[in-house]
Amino acid sequence: MKTEKLFDTDAFIKTNNARVLKCTPSEREGYKNLYEVITDSSIFAPEGGGQKSDEGFFDDIKVVDVQEFDGELIHFLEKEIPIDFDTVQKINFDLRFRRMQNHNAEHLICGLIHKKFGYDNVGFHLSESRDKDGGLLGIEAIMDVDGPISAEDLKEIELNANRAIAENVPIYAVLPTAEEAKNIPYRSKLDISENLRLVIIDGYDVCACCAPCLDSSAQIQLVKIVDFMPHRGGMRITLKAGLDAIDDYIKLHDDNRESMKILSCERGECAAAVKRMNDKLTEAHEEKVSLKRQITVMLEKELREKILNSNDTFIVYPADDIDEIQARALINDNIALAEKVIIILFEKSENTYRFVAGKNDKLTGISLKALAAKMRDGLNARGGGSEQMIQGSIQAEEKDIIDFCRKNDEE
Ligand SMILES: [Zn+2]
């Protein structure tokens, strides 16, 4: 059954009275529980050409998907609808319009690239982000061209595309016969001869395309290339156009204002201010590393004296200002000094310490794994490790930890 595709030549029809010609439960994989509906005319564009099908309703019945199978335009509806009656088709026009803005911006950019470099578009899709209820958050167009382009050239292409937008040139679709098509130079990803539809941006681009299109370049409003990278010998370019580009600008503007406040800088100077801040951070970091080194030297000296002058087998050493790496280094550097178990306490918060404990190899009578188990029971400790080193956290006062070790020492 043939459907008059109203969207082919007028993409701005938002509602349409259509006659339902067919409605049957779908047998297709992925479409079971839905109804396949064919109408005499339709404003619903099917999925194709890199974008999903239109969304909307037949009366109050949701249209879940629209596909073209064997030349038939099939609407997949949530519920059954009576045949031989009229239905009011209504599309989500905001979604349609944003898609057209991004899609036609892609045509314009690709047309300009083709003119300047002769490259072809070898991949395109509209990427849509949605919230958890399916509400549209934003659209961007992602496209691949088959040759390299410098950042500078892309900037020029973008500028020329925005000039073409300001020129307000007509955009329209034509359906030439195979014979007529022979005399029209156009861009196409596929070799199409039958049912050819060309979208023309006057003076800028002619491209085979099945998606609904705008009436004029001015309706694109704005195009911004937001990302590009080398891709399979060519380029992958991401752009935002129209309302999505404007939404993005508002978001970036708000973000920039916040950054300006934090950095105390003027508009357009955030990057320089961040660089200055980064330099200061690097400087501060180097200073911190140097101070840490000095602290470690001091701690080493203190710990060494404690190990050599104490009669206890368990040496408990609180060192608040160090981290785990330093604690391990302190143990490794001093464990050979005497037959002791060294327990370093660090990162105190409330009365929780983190600890690392190591054992001198010659100390055969003590098992660190057994010590870890005892600490879990007696000191609310968590953690474990090997016979050479254990680590974890202890919820106890320093004094309790020392007492605990003394008691262990006597056993
Ligand atoms: Zn297209």
Image (tube, grey):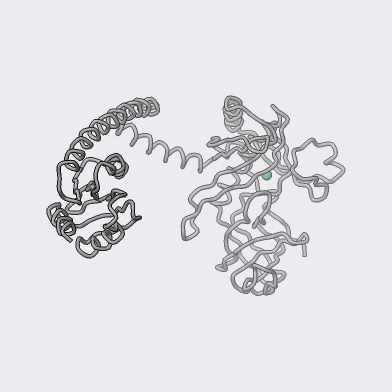
**Residue 129 appears at what percent x and percent y?**
51, 51
Instruction: Residue at 71%, 71% (x, y): give it.
Output: 22
- Left or right: 218 in relation to 24: left
Identity of the residue furthest to the right in this view:
179
- The quadrant the N terminus occupies is bottom right
**Residue 309 % position (x, y):** 15, 42
Q: 127 or 395: which is nearer to us?
A: 395
**Quadrant of the rendered structure where residue 379 is?**
bottom left
Q: Residue 63, image x and y in percent?
A: 60, 64
Residue 169 vs 357, above or below: the answer is above
Residue 363 screen position, x and y as percent: 27, 52
Is residue 276 positioned above or below 366 on the image? Answer: above
* Residue 298 as seen in the image, left or right of residue 7: left
Evaluate whether residue 107 shows in this view. yes
The residue sitting at 22% across, 61% down in the picture is 380
Q: Residue at x 24, y 33 (%)?
A: 297
Where does ligand 1 appear, by image quarter?
top right
Q: Nearer the viewer, residue 171 or 31?
A: 31
Instruction: State the count of labels.
Output: 0
Q: Quadrant of the C terminus?
A: bottom left
Q: Nearer the viewer, residue 379 or 113?
A: 379
Q: Which residue lies at the image location 72% right of the left edge and 40% below the top edge? A: 207
On the question of residue 222 being in view, the answer is no
